[in-house]
Amino acid sequence: MDRYTELALESAEGAGSGVTLCEKRMGRHIKRICFVAEQPFGRELREKGRYFTLLTEKHPLENEGVLRAFSTGIARTLPEMVEGSKKRILAVGLGNPSAVVDALGAETVKCLCAGKRSVSYLATLTPSVFGVTGLETAAVIKGVAREYKPDIILCVDTLATRRAERLFRAVQIGQTIVPGGGVGNQRDALTEQQLGAPLLTVGVPLLAHAERLTSLPSGLVVTPKEIDLVVPAFAKAIAAGVESGLCE
C-alpha cells in the first residue's frame, strides 16, 4: 500500500489507541471530526499534526446548501489552526493544472483575489508538478517563501480515499500534505519545518484506488463521473472559505 493514498481520518480510524476522534455537527448538512496526533500514526505512519475532516452524506452538486456549509466550515476551522500574525498569506495550488482530477488546487487559487486587503496581503502560486517542470514542488514553494516571507502558507490539493462514499463528500484541513500522494507518486512532504512558515492544508478526496473497491487490477483509480463539475464547484467553495476565514 502506498504510504499517502488515504484521508488522514481513515488512517486514524484504523490506528487503534493513541488517536482520539472528536465529532460535532456544523449545521444541517455537515459534521466535523477533529483529532490531534502527537506522533506518526496509522499503518502508513502518517505525519503527526492536527487534522479536521468535514463530512456530508449528501450530494454537493444536488444541494447548494452543502457547498455553502463546506465553505462555512472551512472559514470557521482555518482560524482555529492559526496562531500569531496572518498578514502575509501564500496560497498554493498543488497538483497538475492540466489534469482535471488533479486541478483542484490550481482552480482554487484562480478563485482567490490576490493582493492587498484591509489588513492582510494574499499572494498565490501554482507550482505544477515535477513531471511538467522538473522541479520539486517543495523546493519551488520554499524558494518563493524565502523571498515573500509569508506568515502562513496554505496549500490546496486533491486527495484519495479508500471509501467510495467519501468521494467529493469530505474536506480535510490539516498541517501537512504530500504532493502526489493521492496517485502513488508522492514527492517530499510539505511541513512547517521544511517550508519555514506555518502551514495549513485543504484537500478534497476526488479519487479512490480501484483495488480497494473491487477486484480490478492494481494501479487503476476511479473518480466521480461529474468530475468536470465537481472541481470548479469545490474550488469556489474552498476559495470562499479561505477569503472569509483567513483574509482580512
Image (tube, helix red, strand yellow):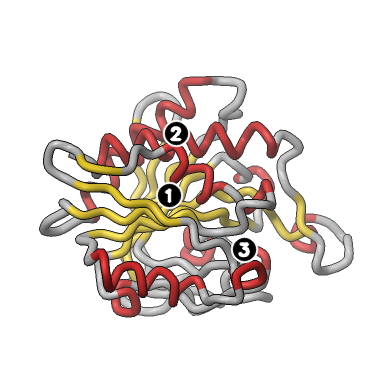
Nearest to the observer: residue 59 or residue 109: 109
Nearest to the observer: residue 99 or residue 45: 99
Residue linked to disc 2: 237
Residue linked to disc 1: 53
**Secondary structure of the residue carrying numbered label 3:** helix
Which residue is located at x 49 percent, y 52 percent? 203
Quadrant for the N terminus, please.
bottom right
Which residue is located at x 47 percent, y 65 percent? 12
Residue linked to disc 3: 182
Tell which circle, 1 or 2, labels the residue nearer the N-terminal end.
Answer: 1
- Residue 30, position in %: x, y? 43, 33
* Label 2 crowd (10 A; few <14 / some 14-19 / many >=20): many
Q: Disc 1 vs disc 2: which is toward the camera?
A: 2
Q: Give the residue type at disc 3.
A: Gly
Residue at the far right: name it.
216
* Label 3 crowd (10 A; few <14 / some 14-19 / many >=20): many
